Amino acid sequence: MNLLFHGDALHLAAHVAHGSVTLAYLDPPFNVGTTFGARTKKGEARATGPKAYEDRWASVEAFVDWLAERLTVVRSLLSDEGTLFLHLDHRAVHEAKVRCDALFGKRQFHGEIIWLPGNGAKGRKGLGVTHQTLLVYAKAAAPVWNARDPMLREPFAATSLSMHFTNEDADGRRYRERTIASRTYRYYADEGRALGSVWSDCPAMVANTPLQKEATGYPTQKPLKLLERVVRAASREGDVVLDPFCGSGTTLIAAARHGRGFVGSDRSPLAISTTRARLEAAGAPFAFRKLGAQRS
């Protein structure tokens, strides 16, 4: 059953079976120090639109303390094949990584993805920060990772194709072979090469504009392509995907589109109404429930 909860992710463990989740993607507040509004109708700006959520903490330490409590809950819901993606920016990602190292163990850190939204630099007094970071942690030793999924591949460079892919198999597929430490590996031109840890091909949603079809007006909406890649990378059809800060519901839409089950939650009433409308429009069945005490 697909589930959508209104409430604090801290209470999820009472409603979701421990060890039932294969992939958890978390896009929490970033400790920006502001209140985020949404664009809910034509001609409305986020600055004057209804409140989406509050993103203010007394300090980065207070923010990370708050986040760590919810990370602990999410970890308990992951299966032994499970993976957690924690999406943050420069404001708190380093402090959050220290907490994740303590919670999961440093050996379970599987790297970080640098996402380039493509919005351009805005800083005028120093280096402009133009990326966000996804920390990747595994619950145990053998997480699901679909390395050969097409969404984790990119085309080989034209020069590489012409210089190295000179062999052809019985099916007419071009390939090259490389021998490393006495083992020979075959690479096919049509499969492309493995995508690295810098993702620059998933342009950010501009949530304040109606020009993009998938835009909902929710202020921190992430592009569907980004979440589809995460979902297909670290889960299989029939697995359960969890997003405890589901916002506009992009993770849940990505899961449904690719044959995964989903569990989403958010404490923002606007996030829940946005997600419900989006899931209903997509024809994705779900049950709606409430968690403990809510606050916007």
Image (cartoon, rainbow, N blue to C red):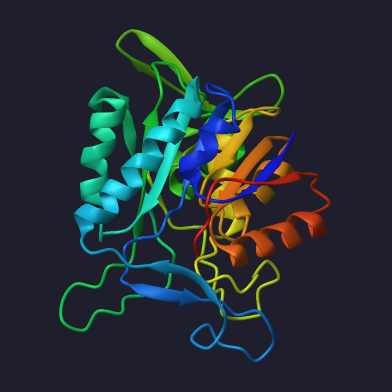
Note whether residue 7 is visible: yes
Tally of numbered discs: 0
Residue 40, relative to residue 218: is it above or below? below
Residue closest to the eye, 149 or 134: 134
Residue closest to the eye, 233 or 256: 256
Percent of width and height locating residue 275: 67, 58
Residue 260, relative to residue 144: is it above or below? below
Residue name at image x 29 percent, y 11 percent: 181
Residue name at image x 64 percent, y 21 percent: 169
Residue farthest front in this picture: 293
Percent of width and height locating residue 118: 43, 68
Task: Tell me the quadrant of the picture where the N terminus can be found.
Answer: top right
Residue name at image x 60 percent, y 64 percent: 269
Residue 229, relative to residue 194: is it above or below? below
Task: Tell me which corner region of the image, top left, top right, bottom left or bottom right, holds residue 225.
Answer: bottom right
Residue name at image x 52 percent, y 52 percent: 293
Percent of width and height locating residue 41: 69, 84
Residue 199, relative to residue 259: is it above or below? below
Note whether residue 190 is visible: no
